[in-house]
Image: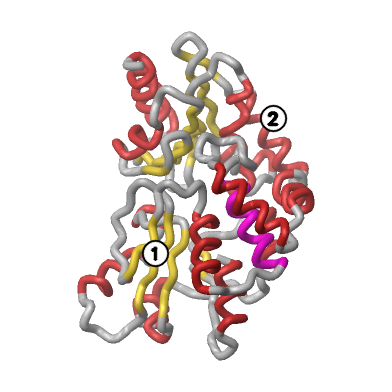
Amino acid sequence: MVALKNVIEQACPTTHVKLLSLSNVGDMYTFMLPDDVWILDKNLTRMDIEAGKLDAFDLIIIVDTRASRQLEGISDYLTQYMHNKDSAGPAVLIIDHHLSGDIEGSCHLVDTRAAAAGEIIYELCKYAGWNLDQNSASALLAAIGTDTGWFRFENTSAQTFDIASQLVSAGAKPDTIYQKINQNHPPERVRLLALTLDTLELHADNRLAIMHITNEMLKQTGAKRSHIENIVNEPQQIGSVIAVALLVELENGHTRASLRSKSLINVNEIAQTYGGGGHARAAGLTIDEPLHSAKIIIINTIIKALDQT
């Protein structure tokens, strides 16, 4: 997203690109962002969207998703606009690498073999002849690094390393980027991690690890919801664990589940059963049930998948 803004404005000096995030950006990523990012419901309201404020743009680019569940606040606008293609308004370009999605665009640049949307954007820039400065290269390396677990996940390919090498050659500094994203947490996040690990349960002969985070735990530690990111990965350190689920109580009383797997089971298929999605080894979903009910559903579903392996 940041890299696209930089390269487009450098290649076309008369073009202005506005970044829109549909939720608050985690503190660990703000070092890459310009000061004028729009945050939905802060700088741009849903009423603004309904009133046609986005119609003033020539192009809308959606990056790293094509799922309506991840585009809350703008998905209705996109659906209505694309169903009425004769109306004046922006074209919609979707850049994504996920296996599933239900949002239609004017043009789809989708490669499910790519480890990250950052890889696709790199190839687009290369094809277009757009130069990557240090800031753009750093943003792309951050995108690829976070989506591959810093090159640990199964989706990491030889191409991933080739592109990372080119980004480092363009000025990206892996150590600095990693430290700012992963070694720059506030004490509140570490306290939340400690409380979350205290909820750890093992099921199915220690093959399934499940944890949860409640609204009370967030209040007790002073942590933000953005601090929850990557906590789900911690139980994967246990040798016997194949699948992990982290259940998070939402403010409306429903439950968000983040799923991870090392091998054998496809958590994307599990997530899709409940309207979610993602990747074979990392996926997410929301269940319209309180945490204790959602926990039973997720445990039973994953154990069934494990028993079928």
Number of the label disc, if any, that sits on residue 206: none
Q: Position of residue 194 (x, y in %)?
A: 69, 30
Please tell me which residue is depicted at 35% across the width and 21% down the height of the picture.
305
Q: Is residue 223 above or below residue 17?
A: above
Q: CA distance from mark 2 to mark 1?
A: 38 Å
What is the secondary structure assignment of the residue under circle 1? Answer: strand
Q: Is residue 126 above or below residue 28?
A: below
Q: Which residue is mark 1?
A: 94
Mark 2 vs 1, N-terminal side: 1
| Helix, strand or loop: magenta stretch | helix
- The quarter of the rendered structure image containing the C terminus is top left
- Which residue is nearer to you in this view: 29 or 295? 29
Give the number of the mark in front: 2 or 1: 1
Q: Which residue is mark 2?
A: 194
The magenta-colored residue range is 134-147
- Which residue is nearer to you in this view: 41 or 306? 306
Dot 2 amino acid type: Ala
> Is the residue under label 1 in contact with that under label 2 (CB below 8 Å)?
no
Q: Position of residue 185 (x, y in %)?
A: 74, 46
